[in-house]
Amino acid sequence: MSFIEKLSTYQLDTLKEIGNIGAGNAATALSKLLNRKIDMQTPAVRIASFDETMELVGGAEKVIVSVFLRIEGEAPGSMFYLFSPEQAEQFVHHITGNDEFSFANPPYPDMGLSILHEIGNILSGSYLTALSDFTKINMQPSVPSLSMDMAGAIISEGLMELSRESDHAIIIDTMIQEPESDKEDIEGHFFLLPDPESFERIFKALGVNDQ
Amino acid sequence: MNATNQIIKVGIADLKIANAPDSLRTTGLGSCVGVVVYDLSIKLAGMAHVMLPDSTMSRNGELNEMKFADTAIDLLIKQLLDKGARRYALKSKIAGGAQMFTFSTSSDMMRVGNRNVEAVTERLKHHRVSITAQDVGGNNGRTIEFFPESGILKIRTVNMGESEI
């Protein structure tokens, strides 16, 4: 893929910095929401085929919970906040104080879904606000949509626009998690997938567009 | 079924051909459509995992024919005929084309599932290949496996159980 080969180290670092700033702000928001310490891992900029993209979250058939939104405006793209169904239960248990919510089998409880939706809303909003402030690019996110299904079915939705141009995705992947892992670990991935035309605009906005 | 049967994996925007007793499988279909074309009399089948409805949507000079409904089906039928399938015996089964997320915005890309199903149906009709069974639409992901031996398509979902068509 020619475009990716042309990316300079400096530009790749810039994309990592975007993950840093966005997910850092989201981690702070989650930390306040749950009143727990949340850390962020160093963001990774991944260049992956569509099949490899699914492997990043455990394969196309793995069941995941996803909050997905489309970014419109000057730098369009797709954004996901992805976590496991077990994680979803922990979120709901923590916020409601009620341990009976289960996402093991449908039908899923409405109240639980509503809470997850709101968490997704807050986190993706925090990510994008930070990103928009940093780049001074106007971003208009759609209302986030929640789905619990196979990773392949979910993530391919975010690949549609870029698939018109390429067979690879550039993914800014940042994991946030609780320090000192145990079973109750809070852990989730942010995927930011800018549409192909957005990279140039992001680089230009940050003054790193010179090859 | 015996242990030597291979499951041939079809990736995203990918296409494979298989003979019985092997089977063809693709996982995590959302708005993508899994298209199976088969000649039961010689137990030969091909499967494509189509992402987008129309190759004219491509903005890239190097076209991946397996990604678009029109070019993928053309290629699928050509490969089957090359391997000895008879055009008049070809039949098809399709699954997928869901809408995974509901958005208030009316972005075209968000209704791509429906458009994929329409485009696949249209292209198969163009080749005079009848669709003997289909499981399309809805808002759930699907994993499908096709058995050229029996012509059965198995469909697995997370929220709606398993079925055979």
Image (cartoon, coloured by chain):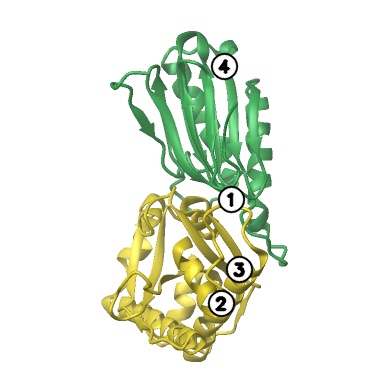
Chain colours: A yellow, B green
Q: From the viewer's perspective, is the residue at label 3 or at label 2 nearer?
A: 3
Residue A176 quadrant: bottom left
Q: Amino acid at mark 3?
A: Gly
Circle 2 residue: A119
Q: From the viewer's perspective, is the residue at label 1 or at label 3 nearer?
A: 3
Q: Amino acid at mark 2?
A: Ile
Q: From the viewer's perspective, is the residue at label 1 or at label 2 nearer?
A: 2
Q: Are marks 3 and 2 on the same chain?
A: yes
Give the Cα distance between marks 1 and 2.
35 Å
Q: From the viewer's perspective, is the residue at label 4 or at label 3 nearer?
A: 3
Category of crowding for the residue at label 4, using alpha-carbon neighbours closer than 10 angstroms: few (below 14), some (14–19), many (at least 20): many
* Mark before the other along the chain sequence, 3 or 2: 3
Disc 4 + disc 2, Cβ < 8 Å:
no
Q: Amino acid at mark 4?
A: Leu
Category of crowding for the residue at label 2, using alpha-carbon neighbours closer than 10 angstroms: few (below 14), some (14–19), many (at least 20): many
Tell which subunit mark 2 falls on: A
Numbered label attached to residue B57: 1
Q: Position of residue A139 (x, y in %)?
A: 59, 81
Numbered label attached to residue A112: 3
Tell which subunit mark 1 falls on: B
Tell which subunit mark 3 falls on: A
Circle 4 residue: B90
Give the Cα distance between marks 4 and 2.
49 Å
Give the Cα distance between marks 4 and 1.
28 Å
Specify the quadrant that holds the C terminus of chain B: top right
